Image (cartoon, coloured by chain):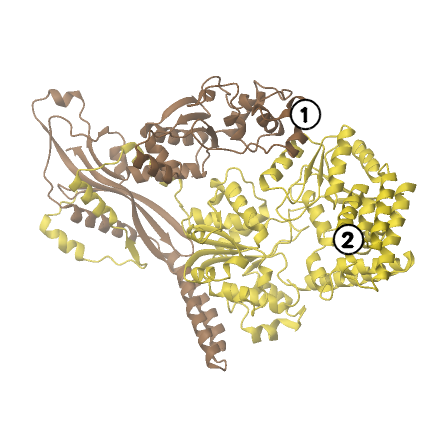
Amino acid sequence: MTHVPRNNLKQEQGQDIVLPVPISFDREWLKDLESRLDKGGPWGDWRLSRLAMEGEISGLVESFEELQCMKHLASLSPLPHQLDTAHKVLFEMSGRAILADEVGLGKTIEAGLVLKEYLVRGLVSKVLILVPASLVLQWVRELNTKFGISAVAQKKAYSWDNDIVVASMDTAKRDPHKELLISREYDMLIIDEAHKLKNKKTTNYQFVQELRKKYCLLLTATPVQNDLGELFNLITLLKPGQLGNQGDFAANFVVDKRVAKNENQLRNELSKVMIRNRRGEGPVTFTKRKVSNVPLTLSPEEQTLYDGVTSFVKDQYQESGGNLSSMLSLVTLQREVCSSRDAVFVTLVNLTKKLPEDSPRRERMIELLQQIRTVKANTKAEKTISLIKEMNEKVIVFTEYRATQEYLLQYFRNHGILSVPYSGGMNRGKKDWMMDLFRGRAQVMIATEAGGEGINLQFCHHMINFDLPWNPMRVEQRIGRVHRLGQQNDVIIHNLSTTGTIEEHILHLLHEKINLFETVIGGLDTILERFEKKESLEKSLYKIMLEAESDEEIRSKVGQLGQTLAELKDGILSESEAAP
Amino acid sequence: MTMTAQQVQKHVMDYLEATECQIIEKSPVHVTVKLSPRADQMLTDRPYYWGFVERTGAEPQTLSFTFVFDPEKYDAAASVPAPRSGTGPGSRGLASQTPWGSGAAAGPGDGTPGGNPGPGAGSNPGADAGGAAGAPIGGGKNTAANNGPNDGLLGRYFGVTPVLPRLGPGLIRREDITFGSRRLRQIWSAAQTEGKCLYLFEATGNHQRMTLFSAAYEPWLAVCFKVELSCDLKREELHFIGISLLTGEIKENFNSILDPLELTPRLPENVHIQPYEISLSSGAGLLERHILSKLSGQDYSWAEAARRRLQGELEIIDAYYSELLKEQGEEKRIAAEEQHASRRKETIWQYEPNISVSPVVYGLFHLRKQ
């Protein structure tokens, strides 16, 4: 017991104990206590005080080095590589990193783990998350449901005052938001799809550079798209100087803008700021994809209709004198015939409505509409039913057309198969509901949309492409719904294709030429980006279909196009092997 | 440290009881409760509603919840009385709501138990399809309800929107509470807000009332300090220490002194408080000093390491910008300077070690003099 006489107190306090680290005391409590003594209360309940202390004890961070977040995340079981990544970001990279996993390895989960850890440790409270507009709600939902992090989507100006805000980059970088955000300090900044920050001169880049942040995560599946300089820019955003200055970087690491030198050294330097997990590496294994192409022959009525539409399209194109842009929608008619009569019917009716009363086209179109009436059966739908009955498991059917979707719903129901629809126009609640119904009791889901906000259907491993999109990215998105982490079985992909139609050519291109179905193509978006510098792939295809005189010509032109894509793919493959 | 479902339940029950909430139903894995106005204000985030009640003097309608501590067991028990085959109107929806017999369904304000579509199904958006299908049928809006599951399913797609979780008097919302869940954190923080500042006496028991001499009570100023040692990483410590305002004696682990005692907010009969020899602010100063001297004996290699990391980072940054600063053009140079300064600031913010000390709870404790 140390008895301290009152008059000695002041002096004793005066002797400073100096710590090697600055220390600050929160002294508000003394004022609070004194004011309550003056007023005679109110006083706290001892039971509640004890509860508060027990809460503190349970959440106490007792060690500098150990992930704390997992004990707060009862319902989440991250994969080993995701935990490793979180660990590295915290303890080796001090919270500034590029997360560059390949598509489908769960970068969002990794970012969520890192964020949760910092929140639990109390090192972060103000957070800004910038993502493409289409992903805002998905981020908010994932952070809330999977991580118990109260993130909100930025909607109004006052939304910025929340602690954890998810906003679209396009909104944030504009005034008046920009000015507000730059005036603040963020404990953590997370940017999804960060490859959009590759160019130093863009407003995106300059905006992010101006933001004041302590920790920072940049997420991208394609850290290098066109040249190594982009990577340099990205790192400069995060940790300027990590790869030396621009001159050093060029001298030390770059041979050609796409070819790196001193690879090992570069890789070593990069590993201090970037984590890239790859598919097929380490413990993450994906099941196989098995492709079965189902060639079908149109019934005589369908064939007649197809020929009718084809010659109509060709004639119109010639009449228009080769004016492409107005003709593109007509090719859609050809594609639609291959899907269902309902699809082509709806489009034809709409086109007819737009024409003036006396247009000569009108008559041709009405003729075609009459022809549609003669088509009674749908070859593809019949085949689909027999496929579904044969597999007797859950299956997702993708089509490009709402009319086909409606038709199939009806058709399946008449054949005693329970199916649910899924389309882009549904609101989120309905989408989730349809997904639950599919998981619970419907055997079939008929979807017109695969992209946008994720639908995750790991419990299903059959998919039928009733018709194919002409954009390879969308095909990959479709497959990605079922072929993803958590899928236990090999994924079986059935491609329906009608012989002697444009579908045949497209399938040939996607399957034979770029082998889209069987393997995940790393950097498919990059391939397309490079290809589409001139013109979009879809448009090129439309052009070929319109201009070609014969089936043979289509074949050879599509073949050339496929060749170009294949070369781009090989080029990118060798680059990504060379680059870290 | 983590907590079992039982521990979590104990914490939640402690809070609900301390705030005088009305427990409607209770089992080892859940509790259904109607909140007291006090708890409602702390937990449900309805400032406008409470503002309205305050201004108009309306009778407050507090919310009710079913807090589930072991979702797995709760769901398992819920599915027993209603086998999956039952897709009839509402059967599953209601069953999942009353796994332990009566009580939960008869929540405040709903008069018709059978026709109540709400709580069970509506509060559980993740329910399996059977449950989801039961909900709107019970709502009595769906004409296709009796035409078998197919019609019902598509009927709802074309016609009726699904029942979304709703909040309001009369509806009981289900919420799973496990360690790490937001509600538990909220309860702790509510407990701290209401319970942080204390003024308590040791209870005497009957014995003291009967004795002739009044007992001497010693005043203690005690604070539970949270010490946060941060750099780019962080560690925390809790120190509950008390100082006698009579003698200046400081005791660590003050909770171990308080735990066995019964404490009461009222001055017991036949006791007297000895006058303070030390003022509150001096006492507070001495407590701070005690913390300081405790901390001064610690190992600070973590701070040295952080400073080394900081130094390394700053060197990289300085080297990078020193090149840029040689750039031609006034404008570019100024821009680079600004960037350099702000990047340096950010880095120091990120790595610089510091310690902060803040109280969790604090107060005056009057204990029988030993």
Q: Nearer the viewer, residue B106 or A572?
A: B106
* Marks 1/2: CA–CA distance: 44 Å
Pointers 1 and 2 within a single chain: no
Chain in yellow in the render: A
Residue matched to label 1? B149
Give the side of residue B13 with respect to residue A369, left or right: left
Task: Give the vertical position of A338 relative to A22 (above or below).
Answer: above
Percent position of residue A7, x then y: 9, 51
| Residue at screen point 68% across, 25% down | B149
Q: Is residue A509 left or right of residue B110?
A: right
Q: Residue at x 26, y 49 (%)?
A: B291
Q: Quadrant of the N terminus of chain A?
A: top left
Asked which secondary structure carries label 2, the reply is loop
Label 2 sits on residue: A355
Q: Residues within 10 Å of mark 2 (few under 14, many from 20)?
A: few
Foreground of the two, B306 or B103? B103
